[in-house]
Amino acid sequence: FRWRHRFLERVKHDLPPRLHGIVEADEMFILESQKGSRKLDRAPRKRGGKAGKRGISNELCCILVARDRSNQTIGALVGRSALKMAQLARHLLPKLDKEVLLVSDSNAAYRAFARQHGIAHRAVNLQAGQRVCHNAAGALHVQNVNAYHQRFRQWLIRFHGVASRYLPNYLGWHRALDGERVTSVEQLLRIAIRFINTKR
């Protein structure tokens, strides 16, 4: 287990330098977990427990995923509770090409972020039943990034619960698998070693 995370600590940094063209962005939420911790900052939950509060709260970890139409993907654990504009500026802005068209749902954080940084933006109002909108660039939606969320959730099931502090490592591992850059343990190790060498 320790060796797994020593290598995954490197793999999580193997990100595309920039996302280009149409970039879909959306957040997903996973119940916060302190699995393996000897000291909890809350009352313990039974395995498979649920959040004590309804809706989006600080009991949920917020994971931001952005993906362009060439399937280049970034994912980041940005904090707990609802997504904030400052988190987008920290985790998403450095990875966006200047000419991107950012597509999101109607979350106001994306609109404010795009306006502040001069990024072209279109929102799809999922709550109103709008799944796709169109412009000169083509069909605009967040279906690719939402499908990625579903694949990540399904993939996590095999681990029977993941501590929140390790979520960035699993995001990196899954990104490598989903992009079919890794089909064996040897390839995963090569990515980790390559990143170590670039940091020397």
Image: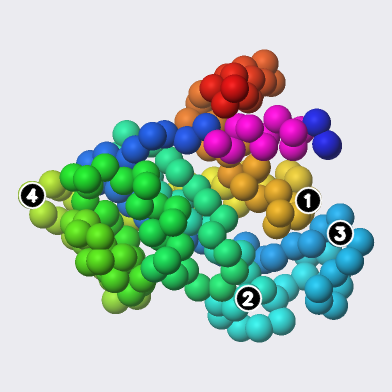
138 sits left or right of 185 in the view: left
Q: Which amino acid type corresponds to the residue marked 2 in the rendered image?
A: Asn
Q: Earlier in the sequence, mark 1 or mark 2?
A: 2
Farthest residue toward the right? 38
Instruction: First in sequence, mark 1 or 3: give its number.
Output: 3
Q: Nearer the viewer, residue 60 or 155?
A: 60
The way the protein has been coloured in the rendering is rainbow
- Structural distance between the alpha carbons of marks 3 and 2: 18 Å
Of tags 1 and 3, the one toward the viewer is 3
Which disc is residue 89 wearing? Answer: none
Residue plotted at (43% across, 40% down): 73
Q: Position of residue 150 (x, y in %)?
A: 52, 51
> What's the mark number on residue 160?
1
What kind of element bears circle 1?
A: loop
Where residue 161 sits, quadrant-wise, is: bottom right
Cβ–Cβ below 8 Å for labels 2 and 4?
A: no
Quadrant placement of the C terminus: top right
Q: Secondary structure at mark 3?
A: loop
Foreground label between 2 and 4: 2
Which residue: 75% across, 55% down? Answer: 163
Res 136 label: 4
Instruction: Give the residue at mark 3.
Output: 37
Quarter of the image with the N terminus is top right
Amino acid type for the residue under numbered disc 4: Ala
- Callout 1: few (<14), some (14-19), or many (20+) C-alpha neighbours within 10 Å? few
Q: Which residue is mark 2?
A: 58
Q: Is residue 12 magenta?
A: yes
Q: Nearer the viewer, residue 180 or 115?
A: 115
Q: Amino acid at mark 1?
A: His
The vertical placement of 133 against 14, above or below, is below
Residue in the picture at 34% in, 38% down:
18
